Image (cartoon, rainbow, N blue to C red):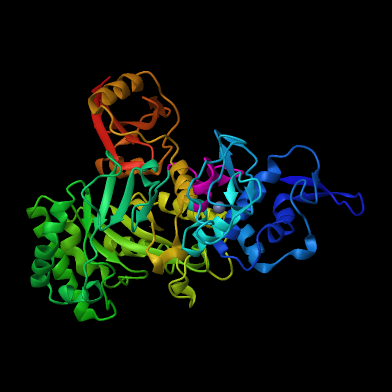
Amino acid sequence: MNIRVRITATGQVLTLDIEEYLRGVVPNESPASWPMEELKAQAVAARTYALAQTGILADDERSQVYRPNSMNPRTDEAIRMTHSIVGRYQGAIKPMFFSASCGGVTLGTWGPWLKHLTNCPCKAAGYGTNGHQQGMCQQGARVLATQGMYYTDILNTYYNMSFSPLNEAATVTPPSKISIQYQTIPAWANQIKLPWQKVIDPGGTDTWPGSKTVGRFWVEDDNQINKYLALGAPGADQYFNRCLPMYRSAPWIYVWEGPNEPQPMSDNLYVVASAAFWSRYVDLMHGAGLKVCIGSWGVTWPHVDQITLFKDALTKTDYWSTHEYGAPTMQSSSGDNCLHYRRLIAALRAASCRVPPLLITECGIDGGCAGQGGCGWRMIVPATSREQYQAQIAWYNTETLKDYEVEQVFLFVAGPKPLWVSFVIDEVLARWVMNTHAFPVTFPVDQAALEKFLGDHCQKTIIPLDKNSAFQKFAQPRGWLPAGLCPDIVYNSVMYSVQPYRSPNDTSVQYIVWCKTGDWGNVKFFIRSN
Ligand SMILES: [Zn+2]
């Protein structure tokens, strides 16, 4: 989006892309040496302030100071990492006022999108009132950034606004399989409604009633967790007995993962022992009435010639899981790291092994795939902007949609612990993930009433075939043939997909498969006379 700015010295009016304009603005509002999260908050405020103006901007304090010769790599970075993100109040872009220091209190009288804050940390840092006290206090924001606060949280401290890209055009073709892993639960997490999510060390309270949550516990000797797998079946008993009280403490968890990224998978004796571990672990979990997901395998593991060693466990487990990362982009590791699961599935099919539903319980960009260990999308070289990362996630979604065996993919990681902040899925990204699901997720639904509604509706409508390959999951093994298609059906504001089938042996009966779009775990079918 372009803005116009009048250069006072020459009277010339320049037309500039907003992002280019900001490069000459942000370094004049915040010193480029300030903490990156403050610079990012400043970039969002300056972008939004400029876009909220009508007409031609001045190049001085009457609008914002624009000096193209002041550009700096650090402020450029802050602008790029917040590319196109603006603040909105009730959907509208509003001027995000900011001032140098508020003296401890922001007034918030120039608009309801500005907060009346009574404890800004600028005062404790020794700063008095300098400016109009409306909106973000720059010295306060600097202190918060120094304390490790992420820029969206800084903005939420000073504004009653939501923050998202200017152009929210969906880049994901529904249905979406994209979910999120939470390392800790941020304050905004209960706003993010997804069919699935994964939580590390879940507490006793369900943040998302009605949806499905994968749980995994970190135990204090997680680094030596491999010892349990090396012991084979007896190790499973030890591990299970250790974890069971924790599993019982979070009964809302839908399915549990076991030890994370077991290794060394290059050691075939270890792999054989771990296969016995997983087989026994499934039995123990099922014996306790718990759903289980085996594997949690790290990138590239198991090798294609190892996967059938896990046949016993795969035959009876509820789910299995692998992790897929790429670097510097997810695509650039395609077939090697990302989409490695396809080779595993092919190997299992070739050996007539069962392929249970697959959860990609971690995915994203990890510099470890390109010699930049422990480095996520925010720090990877060459740099990845938020929009570029979203495009990669969209690509991954499109690819996994081709494989009905993949149930969900979980982006790593929201609420990151300090080691993992460069991987952060912040509130803006989380809301984008939620928007990739083509319908508002509301839980729970009245199942019986819904099925009656679908059955009644389907009787009336016949339209084109096979809009989604995921239906094959149910139809193909049963030898059913598509018999037209219902359009997506909206019931209680939720969109559902429906596929009528007929059995080749009995043309008088339709089998109707339905699911909530993007939630193939909820696929159901019922038989209805014509
Ligand atoms: Zn302040």
Residue 49's spot in the image, x, y percent?
67, 44
Q: In this view, does 312 lie above or below 154?
A: below
Q: In this view, does 490 lie above or below 151?
A: above
- Of residue 416 and residue 67, the one placed in the foreground of this image is 67
| Res. 74 image quadrant | bottom right
Q: Is residue 277 above or below residue 21?
A: below
Report the residue at 46% width, 49% height from top. 427
Q: Is residue 379 left or right of residue 76?
A: left
Q: In this view, does 262 lie to the left or right of 9?
A: left
Q: Answer yes or no: is residue 124 visible.
A: yes
Q: In this view, does 263 lie to the left or right of 85?
A: left
Residue 31's spot in the image, x, y percent?
66, 64
Q: What stretch is highlighted in magenta?
A: 154-175
Report the residue at 49% width, 46% height from top. 118
Does residue 120 belong to the magenta stretch? no
- Of residue 404 and residue 223, the one placed in the foreground of this image is 223
Residue 120's spot in the image, x, y percent?
51, 52
Q: Answer yes or no: is residue 355 visible.
A: no
- Of residue 529 and residue 336, the one placed in the foreground of this image is 336
